[in-house]
Image (cartoon, rainbow, N blue to C red):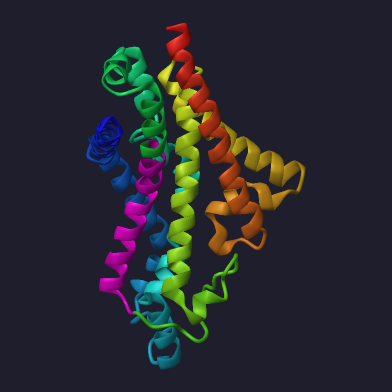
Amino acid sequence: MQNNDCLGSEVKMFLTDLKRGLINGRMLLVVLIAIFLFLLSDYSAIFDTMTFADLKAPDLEGNTEAMEFIQSNGYNKYQIWLKSFSFIGILFPLLVMLPYSASYWEERQTKYQYYIVARTSLHQYVRTKFIVNGLVGGLAIFIPEFLYYIVITILFRNEVLAAPVYQATGPFSELYFSLPELYIGIVLLTHFLIGCTFAAMGMCISTFTKKKIVIYVLPFLLYMGTGILLEGFLGWFAFSPLQWINMMNSFHADPFIMYSSIILLIAASMIIFEYRGKMVKING
């Protein structure tokens, strides 16, 4: 009976925290910023030059083949989707951490965590907090990507072009032509996992700092710094998170290195967060 009560309280805590993480102004802001960045990327790469091209321009007038080529690519959802991510990679860590990664820090500052622990247990609290944070971080990027994909699916053509202007070049890119929906699903899932990773890193860092801004800035600096170091100085492109996020256009992204690195980073963050979280009970 006691085990059932503990399980029930943990599930209730999980659902309450998940609701807090997903339904708040910061999550809405993240979704809006992400969608704006998708639109900006598509405008610069394809909307301006093809989708909304002036087909009555002197150099196109009467050239049926050229007009059909522009329209077939400019109104193709797979082409538009592929060019949506030029700018999102810059702010990726900040976007996935913003909705919830500072929640542990906030509850520690207000002593709210002691109230929660008194009703459940420190182990349940720390574990639930870490799991919810990972899910919220992943969904912070998955939700706008999925919504944007749904919109372009409704508005544009759903055909696989034999000779498109843009082609996927990264891991699993052969699926872009044979099973494009599966390929897009793999990319969305990968971005979800990367979102989980940086959200976990942010919450892990929150156990070490007294300044909230550090929770957001330090993972972002690590993201950019390791990318520059690994790519620019060491030539280890496959280990760079910049390549993981841009896996659709990267010759360097290696699936084994990428997914194993994600697992290791999440595991390391979980171990450190649980250790640091439980130290609260010892140190007060």
| The residue positioned farthest toward the right in the image shown | 234
Foreground of the two, 107 or 79: 107
Per the image, is 273 magenta?
no
Q: Report the magenta residues as a range.
A: 133-157
Name the residue at 55% across, 27% down: 272
Name the residue at 38% across, 61% down: 43
In the drawing, does residue 217 fall left or right of residue 75?
Answer: right
Q: Is residue 234 placed above or below 110 in the rendered structure? A: below
Position of the N terminus, as image quadrant, is: top left
How many numbered discs, if any?
0
Position of the C terminus, as image quadrant, is: top left
**Rendering coords of residue 203 (x, y %):** 45, 29
Name the residue at 43% across, 59% down: 188
**Rendering coords of residue 40 (x, y %):** 38, 55
Foreground of the two, 75 or 20: 20
**Rendering coords of residue 120 (x, y %):** 30, 24
Q: Main secondary structure of the magenta part?
A: helix
Is residue 176 at least partly visible in the picture? Answer: yes
**Rendering coords of residue 95 (x, y %):** 40, 40
Q: Quadrant of residue 42?
A: bottom left
In the drawing, does residue 219 fall left or right of residue 238?
Answer: left
Q: Is residue 1 placed above or below 71 in the rendered structure? A: above
| The residue positioned farthest toward the front in the image shown | 1
Per the image, is 153 magenta?
yes
In the drawing, does residue 47 fall left or right of residue 222?
Answer: left
Q: Is residue 61 placed above or below 15 in the rendered structure? A: below
In the drawing, does residue 184 fall left or right of residue 238?
Answer: left
